[in-house]
Image (cartoon, rainbow, N blue to C red):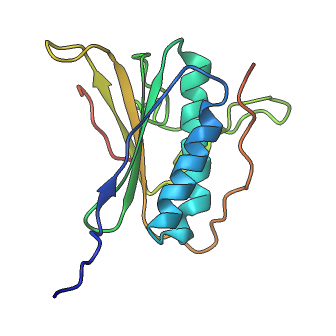
Amino acid sequence: MGTVSLPDTWVYALRLPHDPRAARVARMTVRTALSSHGRHELVDVVELLTCELVTNAYRHTCGPASLRPACLADGRLRVGVWDSHPRVPAPFGDPPWDRVGPAPEDADGGRGLRLVQELADSWGSWTVRPGPLERGAGKLLWFEVGELREGLTPPRTCPPSPGPERAGTHA
């Protein structure tokens, strides 16, 4: 009898309600998935970037979001977050808006997408238009990370959650 080896690629999908707790649920989901698959070196950065995208989906839309973490065949990890708002923010959009500047020192927010720009190996977006079989429109923002690069250690906190027609790769 042969042994069973687990596949190196995987994908999970989670539908998130428009709820201030969604970012926490998303963080716990990616942490559990990565830990279960032995990708401990990526947990902190993926958890942080996922939290930022899900928090933005909550803050800037009135509907649900979806989370889709996946391990690709070459070992990279891709996380996609769909929401119902069609506007694609920097750094996911087209130039000259493809970079996010630093937030003012006294700002309460505005740092999340800059973290994606600084910590992800690549990122992009797809605009989703409703079709005959699709019910919702909006956008999908995604980022990819491989091995955590030396010297990059993301902060361990995420801001508290408040009370395609285009595809791109940036680096």
Please indicate whether residue 127 sits to the left or right of residue 156 in the image: left
Residue at the outermost bottom position: 1
Residue at the outermost front position: 1
For this rendering, which residue is in front, 45 or 109? 45
Task: Work out whether 139 lies above or below 151.
Answer: above
The answer to whether residue 75 is visible is: yes
Q: How many marks?
A: 0
Residue drawn at x 44%, y 16% as measured from the top left: 85
Please indicate whether residue 107 sits to the left or right of residue 32 in the image: right
Residue 105: x %, y % from top left? 83, 36
Residue drawn at x 79%, y 29% as measured from the top left: 108
For this rendering, which residue is in front, 48 or 123? 48
The picture quadrant where one finds residue 19 is: top right
Task: Work out whether 85 lies above or below 160.
Answer: above
Residue drawn at x 73%, y 23% as measured from the top left: 162
Please indicate whether residue 108 sits to the left or right of residue 143 in the image: right
Residue 18: x %, y % from top left? 56, 19
The answer to whether residue 100 is visible is: no
Task: Work out whether 60 lies above or below 157.
Answer: above
Residue drawn at x 27%, y 30% as measured from the top left: 166
Residue 111: x %, y % from top left? 68, 38
Check the picture and name the quadrant holding the N terminus: bottom left
For this rendering, which residue is in front, 136 or 111? 136
